[in-house]
Image (cartoon, grey):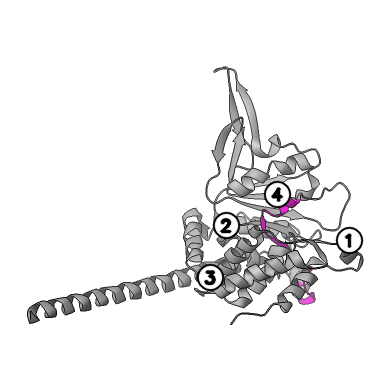
Amino acid sequence: MSEEINDIQSNEMSNESNNSSQEGFGFERSKAEQIWLTGKVSEVRALLSQYVIGQHEAIELMLTGIFSNGHLLLEGVPGVAKTLSAKVLAKALNIDFSRIQFTPDLMPSDVIGTSVFNMKEATFNFKKGPVFSNIVLIDEINRAPAKTQAALFEVMEERQITYDGVHYNMEFPFLVVATQNPIEQEGTYNLPEAQLDRFLFKVKVHYPELNEEEEIMQRYKNNLSSPDLTQIKAVLNAEEIRRAQKSVEDVVIEDNLVKYIAAITLKTRNHGKIYLGGSPRASLSMLKSSKAIAAIKGRDFVTPEDIQFVATPVLNHRVILTPEAEMEGATPEQLITEIIQSIEVPR
């Protein structure tokens, strides 16, 4: 009997030892993934800084979008490096890249593709459009009419194109990076709310600070040509992007922070100056992007500050103000900040 008890105890000790060693291995693996990811982020930042001066917050949000698998809308006046930032970021990733210049006469077939008649086989073959790529840069997205914008609805949400009853899946990764000018109204169209909701972030690209503007001029005072992007060496490939997104999935977010996100979104729906609040997709976007920003900063857990950092770019294009609030000069950013300050921060 005593021998049986000894055997049971030794087996239990052995199991506990195995479990603890597995937990230790998991912790070491998680730590190694964090170190790898932050190292790659530093490389991308260093690469971007060679071409884009300043815009640190915009770059941080663009990286967050890549690692949380979300589409990005860059908004800013002409000349603040929106397109350049997107192109350099795409070059930093060893994946396919295409650019579409949206114009008022652009047709949906110019984006997704069209059927071409094959005379030899007497059949129609689908010729894929420029949207079939990994990163699609859409310049001046608000210059195309509603029917062309509608061509993006399915591909942005489901990452597939349906043409003539046939589904064509996009290769991983698939990200839309769009730019628009908020000032000029001539020849532009308002983006449909359903399309805006498909963008993870609307990133406001602002004018540079005085010292940054001086640095820009110092860099180009003896060089009249445009920046040469052909020499950029890619930092991440498709499999490494998938690995980075897996690291983001492993980031822990506590239940009280999930409730905090839900409370912020709910407040946008009940605010007196907001006509249309955030959707459940907005809550999910805050959750995903807060995990991504935590991973970028080398943490395996989300803090309230991560949520507060991503809340404005997640919500600023999803909320519609009441006419009275617009007449008062209120902005979505001001009201979102007010909402965040009115909700108790979980600790």
Closer to viewer: mark 1 or mark 2: 1
Residue 182 vertical placement versus 148 (above, below): below
According to the image, label 3 marks what residue? Answer: 295
Query: Could you say which is closer to the camera, residue 110 or residue 82?
Result: 110
Circle 2 — which element? loop
Report whether residue 140 is seen: no
Q: Which circle's residue, 4 or 2, is located before the other in the chain?
A: 2
Q: Which residues are magenta?
A: 193-212
Q: Do the residues bearing badges 4 and 2 touch, measured as CB atoms within 8 Å?
A: no
Q: CA distance from mark 4 to mark 3?
A: 28 Å
Q: Which amino acid type is shown beneath numbered disc 2?
A: Asn
According to the image, label 4 marks what residue? Answer: 138
Q: Do the residues bearing badges 2 and 3 touch, measured as CB atoms within 8 Å?
A: no
Q: Which amino acid type is shown beneath numbered disc 4?
A: Ile
Closer to viewer: mark 4 or mark 3: 3
Q: Which circle's residue, 2 or 3, is located before the other in the chain?
A: 2
Circle 3 — which element? helix
Residue 308's mark?
A: none
According to the image, label 2 marks what residue? Answer: 69
Q: Which circle's residue, 4 or 3, is located before the other in the chain?
A: 4
Q: Do the residues bearing badges 4 and 3 touch, measured as CB atoms within 8 Å?
A: no
Q: Label 2 neighbourhood size at 10 Å, few (<14), some (14-19), many (20+)? A: many
According to the image, label 1 marks what residue? Answer: 323
Residue 170 in the image: state x and y as whole percent.
55, 44
Magenta segment includes 292: no
Q: Which circle's residue, 1 or 4, is located before the other in the chain?
A: 4
Q: CA distance from mark 1 to mark 4?
A: 30 Å
Q: CA distance from mark 1 to mark 3?
A: 39 Å
Query: Could you say which is closer to the camera, residue 338 or residue 112?
Result: 338
